[in-house]
Image (cartoon, grey):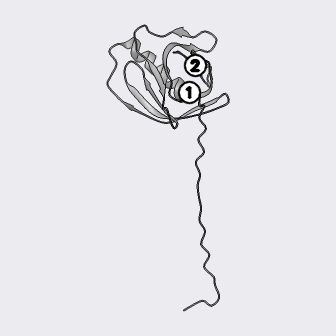
Amino acid sequence: MRLPGIPIIGVLVLVVSCTVVDESLSGTSWTLAALGPVSAPQPALEGSGAALSFSEEGNEVTEDTGCNSYWGSYEADGESFTIAELSWHERGCPSDGLFQQESAMIDILVGAHRYSSSDSRLTIESADGRALVFKR
């Protein structure tokens, strides 16, 4: 049976993803200098090679903890900083100290909510009061 007079209405839904990226982070690489409580971060393990890099274009971030490699996306706006979709390539850690440092780095990065940066220093803070401090 045909229904008379019922018009067909098409609806086009466009979803726009709006990712905010701090241009001053784009294309930069940072070496881990310290981590721990915001008020008193402890020096990173010497020679660990722990580093964080931001892509030249887009919102991609990569991290090498000295044990494993991680990558994902980030948003940075004002003081707000978040990490999403973190993936990793597991190689293992050569020492317990590096494993503990890696665990702390990932916990802080995944829980990140604030950051500050200058030409030579980047600090990423987690909601639980811990920080990663990087230098160039």
Q: Which residue is mark 1?
A: 25
- CA gap between label 2 and label 1 equals 9 Å
Within the image, what quadrant is residue 22 found in? top right
Q: Quadrant of the N terminus?
A: bottom right
Question: In the displayed structure, does residue 116 sit left or right of residue 32?
Answer: right
Q: In front here: 61 or 126?
A: 61
Secondary structure type for disc 1:
loop
CB of mark 2 within 8 Å of CB of mark 1?
Answer: yes
Q: In front here: 23 or 33?
A: 23
**Residue at the image point whose x is 57% and y is 19% from the top:** 122
96 is higher (above) or lower (below) than 127: above
Q: Which residue is mark 2?
A: 122
Q: In front here: 88 or 122?
A: 122
Q: Residues within 10 Å of mark 2 (few under 14, many from 20)?
A: many
Residue 70 in the image, given as x and y percentages of width and height: 42, 29
**Residue type at tag 2:** Leu
Q: Earlier in the sequence, mark 2 or mark 1?
A: 1
**Residue at the image point whose x is 62% and y is 75% from the top:** 9
99 is higher (above) or lower (below) than 110: above
Residue 44 in the image, given as x and y percentages of width and height: 48, 10
* Marks 2, 1: nearer the viewer: 1
**Residue at the image point whose x is 65% and y is 88% from the top:** 5
Query: Tag on residue 124?
Result: none
Q: Residues within 10 Å of mark 1 (few under 14, many from 20)?
A: many
Within the image, what quadrant is residue 2 found in? bottom right
**Residue at the image point whose x is 57% and y is 14% from the top:** 120
Q: Residue furthest right?
A: 78
**Residue type at tag 1:** Leu
Residue 33 in the image, given as x and y percentages of width and height: 51, 12
